[in-house]
């Protein structure tokens, strides 16, 4: 028995090494392939598909990425990330251009955009200061309360947020000789920021800060004992995550050409959590996978439900049931399903 | 730590007055500020306002109405939040479907009222139907994920989405108003002076009778719950479970049964509150998230898992909301939010919560 194990072990190690190698390659091949498809997509698909479906999914992915970063690496499930996006979206309309000259200041884009992002990041950091005073499950409650408070503020406040009407006609700027309002430039702008955000999160997760944050997630007491400032790490994580939410919020406004309380409402906040959880909190790509699934469901559920003889208006139930199924059967989301499937495929091959 | 709490609460309960004295001794400035605030509030409510005062702050009728609306709204919030906080305190997950239970109770009460014509019968139906839904949720779903509080919370979220969509399906998107029964219609005179006529006669406040009755009912329910928690065997079990449910389970008590009972009771209270809300205002699409938010704010301010905390938080949030709507409409929700932030900054566990 013991002898068999000894003779077995090198070959087992070899199998494992080739497994991890091939898994690494397959994962990166998938990302590269995905990037290529996204780059050439506008050449083969219509405006609606590449802007309203894929572009919209990438924007939701960027915002969900900020939730994924906090929840996956920091262990803090924040429902206020859509609110951060809403803050930056509202700020870009207040400082930039809209159809309401009484409120909008019409500052040039290179002033308005940084201000909007700075305010949103400050808001995100403040959320972090508040919610890191408590832990775990309380974070959901506090961030949901913050999200709801901001939603009702935008709904009731007319001097700054223009009440339930919100703002319309918020054009993307004309900069560097390119009119970003056209679908094609806007699509590539979104793609650029989606790729940058994805790489930034992946990079930061491997920096000392990202590793310390994961330590804080796993055992805050021990990290505190080692000498790390747990609260500072958490607040910094909120601020960093808010940056993506803020970028996503501005792109969202430019794509939709409008913003209203519903854009950052309670439902939108919860949908964002659904996106992140369905995709999987274990890896940044999960945010984008969840977003594309959500957008496809949302865009085509009506027709497909009608096609199989059900009421098309019940797509919210469909989304809820999908979410429940994922939470009940695969807590690590679609990524978890994928990883298990890959592991099983490889396990099967090495066994045979 | 758990045993320390157990010993502490055992010693504290009989000597509540003593605890208050100790608190005043430890925080003389806070106690003084609280006493001044109570006296000012009483004066504002009971005394007729001088003329100059009314010029600055508006009419007293407005203020008194806001306060009364706030307190009765607080009673409604208490009914919703107390089930929420009880479930959280015992089972340690946030039931984000609590707002859906509130809405469901309101609709069931409305249907029962339409069928039988009895407002009170609606309460029975709402309580029972919500309790059954709650029991089913606890029995079929949450029991299977014991100890995974994040996952349980996410499941409640998914359920709330499905529930709210199904309710839109059945009852549509229009607001439904539950009719106040005849014997509770109309105003009741109260001994509070709101203005003085030029002839020198005092004008007394007239206030809707149904709201006062609901307020009294909420107080009765609150006191009843306090008594049940502190004077009955099952109350002892619940309090022990809040402190340390593993220990309770080890001692041979059927914790799962207790969980189901508490979940059923909390859900039933939310259902009752649904009828109250439908009578006060109306029930419609979106009210579920409104009342979920209210419950969150109430328990964050009052203290998570504490029933007296839920009562205090409900009154504070209710009054803040109504006063905000009366005096600065554009920023009404900011007021409740600011209160929440201040509480979190000074006492993260909530006013009456404990760590």
Image (cartoon, helix red, strand yellow):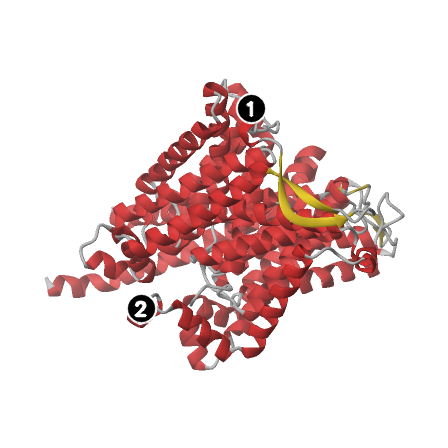
Residue for point 24% across, 58% down: B248
A283 versus B32 height, above or below: above
Q: Distance between the Cα atoms at labels 2 and 1?
A: 52 Å
Residue A300 in percent (x, y) is at: 58, 29
Viewer-nearest of discs 2 and 1: 2
Observer-nearest of B13 and B168: B13
Can residue A153 be seen in the rendering of this structure?
A: no
- Residue A312's disc number: 1
B2 is higher (above) or lower (below) than B178: below
Q: How far across and how far down the image is residue A189, in percent? A: 72, 50
Which residue is found at the position 40% from the left and 76% from the top? A222
* Mark 2 residue element: helix
Name the element at disc 1.
helix
| Label 2 close to label 1 by CB (< 8 Å) | no
How many tags in the picture?
2
Identify which residue, A96 or A270, lies in the foreground: A270
On screen, residue A239 versus residue B130, left or right, reads: right
Relative to B296, residue A239 above or below: below
Quarter of the figure that contains the N terminus of chain B: bottom left
Chain letter of the residue beneath label 1 in the structure image:
A
As drawn, is A220 to the left or to the right of B76? left
Sort mark 2 into few (<14), some (14-19) or many (20+) by Cα contacts within 10 Å.
few
Q: Residues within 10 Å of mark 1 (few under 14, many from 20)?
A: some
Tell me where residue A289 appears, x and y as whole percent: 53, 45
Which residue is painted at 46% across and 51% down in the image? Answer: A26
- Tell me where residue B53 sits by quadrant: bottom right
Question: Measured from the top left, where is residue B89 in percent x and y?
Answer: 39, 56
Residue beneath disc 2: B2
Chain to which the residue tagged by mark 2 belongs: B
Q: Is residue A131 visible?
A: yes
* Above or below A110: residue A34: above
């Amino acid at each position: 028995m013991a002898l068999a194990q000894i003779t077995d072990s090198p070959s087992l190690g070899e199998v494992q090494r080739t497994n991890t190698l091939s898994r690494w390659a397959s994962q990166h091949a998938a990302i590269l392939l995905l990037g290529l498809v996204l780059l050439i997509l506008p050449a083969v698909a219509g405006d609606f598909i590449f802007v309203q479906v894929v572009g919209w999914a990438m924007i939701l992915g960027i915002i969900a990425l900020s939730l994924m970063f906090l929840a996956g690496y920091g262990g803090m499930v924040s429902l206020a990330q859509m609110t951060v996006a809403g803050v930056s979206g509202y700020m870009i309309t207040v400082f930039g251009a809209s159809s309401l000259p009484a409120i909008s200041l019409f500052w040039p884009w290179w002033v308005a955009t940084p201000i909007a992002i700075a305010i949103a990041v400050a808001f995100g950091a403040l959320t972090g200061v508040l919610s890191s005073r408590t832990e775990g499950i309380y974070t959901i409650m506090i961030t949901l309360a913050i999200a709801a408070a901001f939603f009702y503020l935008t709904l009731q406040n007319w001097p700054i947020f223009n009440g339930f009407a919100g703002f319309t006609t918020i054009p993307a700027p004309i900069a560097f000789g390119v009119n970003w309002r056209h679908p094609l430039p806007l699509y590539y702008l979104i793609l650029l920021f989606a790729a940058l955000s994805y790489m930034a999160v992946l990079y930061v997760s491997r920096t000392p800060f990202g590793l310390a944050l994961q330590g804080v997630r796993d055992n805050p007491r021990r990290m505190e004992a080692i000498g790390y400032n747990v609260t500072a790490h958490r607040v910094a994580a909120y601020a960093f995550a808010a940056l993506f939410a803020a970028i996503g919020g501005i792109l969202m406004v430019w794509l939709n050409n409008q913003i209203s309380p519903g854009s950052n409402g309670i439902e939108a906040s919860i949908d964002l959590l659904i996106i992140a959880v369905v995709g999987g909190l274990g890896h940044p790509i999960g945010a984008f996978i969840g977003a594309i699934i959500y957008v496809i469901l949302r865009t085509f559920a009506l027709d497909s439900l009608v096609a199989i003889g059900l009421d098309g208006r019940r797509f919210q139930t469909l989304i809820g049931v999908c979410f429940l199924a994922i939470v009940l059967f695969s807590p690590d989301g679609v990524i978890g399903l994928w990883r298990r499937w890959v592991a099983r495929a490889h396990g099967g091959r090495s066994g045979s | 730590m758990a045993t320390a709490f157990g010993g502490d609460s055992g010693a504290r309960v009989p000597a509540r007055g003593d605890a208050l004295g100790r608190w005043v001794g430890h925080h003389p400035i806070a106690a003084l500020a609280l006493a001044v605030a109570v006296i000012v509030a009483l004066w504002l409510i009971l005394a007729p306002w001088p003329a100059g005062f009314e010029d600055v702050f508006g009419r007293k009728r407005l203020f008194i109405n806001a306060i009364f609306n706030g307190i009765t709204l607080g009673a409604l919030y208490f009914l919703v939040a107390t089930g929420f906080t009880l479930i959280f305190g015992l089972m340690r997950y946030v039931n984000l479907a609590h707002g859906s239970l509130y809405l469901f109770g309101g609709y069931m009460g409305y249907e029962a009222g339409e069928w039988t014509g009895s407002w009170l019968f609606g309460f029975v139906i709402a309580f029972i139907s919500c309790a059954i839904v709650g029991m089913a949720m606890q029995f079929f779903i949450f029991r299977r994920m014991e100890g995974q509080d994040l996952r349980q919370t996410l499941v409640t979220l998914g359920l709330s989405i499905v529930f709210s969509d199904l309710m839109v399906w059945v009852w549509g998107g229009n607001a439904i108003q539950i009719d106040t029964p005849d014997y509770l219609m109309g105003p009741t005179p109260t001994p509070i002076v709101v203005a003085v006529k030029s002839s020198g006669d005092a004008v007394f406040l007239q206030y809707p009778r149904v709201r006062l009755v609901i307020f009294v009912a909420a107080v009765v329910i609150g006191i009843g719950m306090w008594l049940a928690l502190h004077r009955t065997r099952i109350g002892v079990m619940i309090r022990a479970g809040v402190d340390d449910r593993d220990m309770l389970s080890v001692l041979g008590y059927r914790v799962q049964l207790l969980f189901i009972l508490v979940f059923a009771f909390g859900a039933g209270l939310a259902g009752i509150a649904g009828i109250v809300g439908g009578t006060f205002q109306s029930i419609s699409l979106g009210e579920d998230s409104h009342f979920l938010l209210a419950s969150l704010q109430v328990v964050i301010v009052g203290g998570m898992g504490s029933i007296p905390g839920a009562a205090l938080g409900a009154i504070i949030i209710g009054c803040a909301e109504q006063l905000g709507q009366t005096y600065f409409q554009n920023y009404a929700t900011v007021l409740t939010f600011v209160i929440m932030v201040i509480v979190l900054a000074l006492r993260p566990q909530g006013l009456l919560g404990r760590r």
